[in-house]
């Protein structure tokens, strides 16, 4: 009973149930990444395909197509980084999969909480600086980037 009461006080669902709080305000208060996901849903083109890294698997909050590793949240990106020698190879792997955007939590991708090796962090950072354009930074934690198109790709 203690945990139920504690969670109830933390979540505070009555205001939304009674119509005193909007759905967006409730979600933003309870899910730190919600403002970024709302931006994805309202500002990105409907045909955007977002590759998420360490953004949890919040499928019910996305109105745009996205990909998320459900158990090991960086498995796909770490596999791509492990199999790539250059930032261009990372870019090509993501483009082949059809991704248009990358959304990640910096605490887990480049911070101490993540599983990326130092070598993979360096490769990811180089890939980011050469092949991604910042779209939005949320709370200095969540970063949404657009992958450069072929015609914008730097010369090899």
Image (cartoon, grey):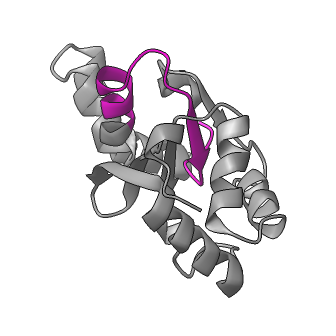
Decide if residue 12 is in sight here: no
Give whichever of 106, 29 is nearer the camera. Answer: 106
Give whichever of 79, 17 is nearer the camera. Answer: 79
Residue 80 x %, y %: 77, 58
- Looking at this view, name the residue that lies furthest to the left: 20
71 over 25 or under it: above or below: below
Q: Quadrant of residue 137?
A: bottom left
Q: Which residues are magenta?
A: 37-57
Q: Residue at x 69, y 83 (%)?
A: 119
Residue 110 x %, y %: 53, 74
Q: Give the position of the C terminus as an image quadrant.
A: bottom right
Give whichever of 144, 100 is nearer the camera. Answer: 100
Decide if residue 101 is in sight here: yes
Q: Give the position of the N terminus as an image quadrant.
A: top right
150 with respect to 94 (left or right): left
Q: Residue at x 56, y 82 (%)?
A: 112
142 over 41 or under it: above or below: below
């Amino acid at each position: 009973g203690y945990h139920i009461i504690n969670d109830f006080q933390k979540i505070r669902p009555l205001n939304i149930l009674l119509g005193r709080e909007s759905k967006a305000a409730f979600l933003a208060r309870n899910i730190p990444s919600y403002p970024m996901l709302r931006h994805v849903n309202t500002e990105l083109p409907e045909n955007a395909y977002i590759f998420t890294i360490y953004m949890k698997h919040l499928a019910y909050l996305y109105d745009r197509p996205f990909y998320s590793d459900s158990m090991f949240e960086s498995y796909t990106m770490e596999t791509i980084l492990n199999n790539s020698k250059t930032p261009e190879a990372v870019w090509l792997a993501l483009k082949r999969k059809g991704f248009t955007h990358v959304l990640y939590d910096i605490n887990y991708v480049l911070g101490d909480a993540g599983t990326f090796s130092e070598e993979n962090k360096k490769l990811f950072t180089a890939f980011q600086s050469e092949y991604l354009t910042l779209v939005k930074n949320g709370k200095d934690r969540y970063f949404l980037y657009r992958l450069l198109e072929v015609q914008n790709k730097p010369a090899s």
